[in-house]
Amino acid sequence: MRPALLIAVREFLGNARTRGFWFGILMVPLLWVIASQVPLWLARKGTPTRHFALVDATRSGRSAGVILGHLRRVEERRESMHFREWAAPRLQPGRSLPASDGAQAPWRELQSRVAESMRADAGAFAPPEPLHRPVVLPAGLEWRGDLAEFEGRLRDWLREERPCAPEGGGEPVVLFGAAIVLDGEGPGEPPVLRFWSANQADTRLRDAMAEALSRDHRQVEYTRRGLDPAIVAQVEAAGARVVDLNPRKAAGEERVGLADLLRQWAPSAFVYLLWIAVFAVSQMLLNSLIEERSNRILEVLVSSVTPLQLMVGKLLGVAAVGAVMTLAWIGSLVLVTVWMVGASGVAAVAPDSAVARLPVELATLLADSWILPAFALYFVLGYLFYSAVILALGSTCSDLKEAQNFTGVIALFMMVPLVSITFIPRDPNGPVATLLSWIPPYTPFVMMNRVAAGPPMVDVLGTLALLVVSDVLVLWACARVFRRAVLRTGQPASLVQLARWIAGRG
């Protein structure tokens, strides 16, 4: 056993001293930060101001005012939200922002209300650039009453990207789009919005215009039919109050909260971690083996230890690397979550909100559930299964290119749990989840996804026993292949040759 432990220590230190090891530790929390923060950053600062031309060709001539008023209110709410995010971390200790209402007071009014609560070094708030800004129709693009003729000129203007002057002055800009509002086809029919734009991916401006026109048309129709728009709006705003209850919880604690949602969906995140950890560590093991084989180091090692001791030492050493890496991932993810919630200022804006309670609920979930013990157990068993297979197949290859052909097939085989990762939490004890749980290569990932749903004990113990037996058989078969192939040269062994080695005939 001592030679195997020495090999394990050598393997662990050899991987822990590489840049790839530290890159792997930083990769997951970095991806978590990027995936959660970059879309928000792009939504706030990555989209330029969209300049648009607006032509109101309706008989009433009020549609342009309706659209511009709606866009102005949207912009005010956006500015108020940005001010709250800016002001929250700059408040004096013990102070908080006023509760937010649906109307979202303009940021200047809000600023005057919280001026005494701000720190002396808070600085000045700079409102964001507007999302949408109208332009003055230039000469040559004025409305002359003929839709076809106007749209012919407009098409050339948009296609050639001719500059226009924005309202309120400023540098000439290129039109993002142009909107033409026409009367409906008959009495009581809603207006028609003809929206021209070469960018069909960003539909926010078009949708905002359509929403404003639709809402205004409904108000007009309510009045025309003798209905009070205010009463109709009050009735439409009313909705059923939904209270989610879980029969598995104790009496008096049946209400479902953030912790319950985390309990349901957190295992899916751990399945991703488990998949990445098993595959990354197995790949690490393969690279180490191929490198030592290419450098003739294996021949030196096998002259001092048996092939079985070498295999066990490599499995233990790289398993320790994987354990350190996954522990670092889990710890850093928790710390990143706490940091993001604190940096967003949510605790100051809305201390009782679900987002502000997220770090506490996440810590409670990890402490009071079986997620971490299950993760550790299934990591070990899944790692032994796949790493033994990869190690045995890698021992038959003379270079990394040959070995990657095998790992590509194994990676495709391992994709099945990822495909079902969002389906299983919705039906964790259904036939699909149950069937996949009893397939040993998939057991670690599927059972990890079911662990918080209280699967039947027969599934927990039965699949665990089957997985342990499968690991033992796989380790035994792969040890036989490894013993015969580790010093073998020439072409990779065929499937028939592998079967003969396992059977002890080669």
Image: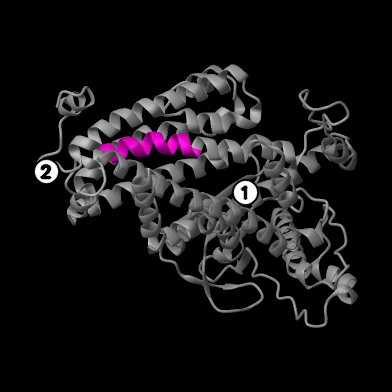
Residue 83 picture quarter = bottom right
Seen in the image, is 415 located left or right of residue 96?
left
Secondary structure at badge 2 equals: loop
Residue 383 forms part of the magenta stretch: yes
Seen in the image, is 282 located left or right of residue 352?
left
Q: Nearer the viewer, residue 197 or 86?
A: 86
Q: Amino acid at mark 2?
A: Thr
- Identify the residue at image location x=22%, y=47%: 302
Say whether marks 1 and 2 touch (CB < 8 Å): no
Q: In the image, which is nearer the foreground, mark 1 or mark 2?
A: 2
Vertically, is 423 above or below 67? above
Residue 51, given in percent of the width and then of the height, sits at 57, 65
Residue 234, given in percent of the width and then of the height, sits at 88, 39
In this rendering, does residue 76 appear at all?
Answer: yes
Residue 69 picture quarter = bottom right
Q: Nearer the viewer, residue 250 or 219?
A: 250
Seen in the image, is 461 located left or right of residue 220?
left
Q: Amino acid at mark 1?
A: Asp
Find the magenta span and give its range.
379-392
Local crowd at mark 2 within 10 Å, few (<14), some, or many (≥20)?
few
Residue 380 forms part of the magenta stretch: yes
According to the image, label 1 marks what residue?
207
Distance in Å between CA atoms under marks 1 and 2: 66 Å
Residue 383, given in percent of the width and then of the height, sits at 42, 39
Question: What numbered label is drawn on residue 489?
Answer: 2
The mark that comes first in sequence, 1 or 2, is: 1
The quarter in which the C terminus is drawn is top left
Q: Nearer the viewer, residue 352 or 182?
A: 352
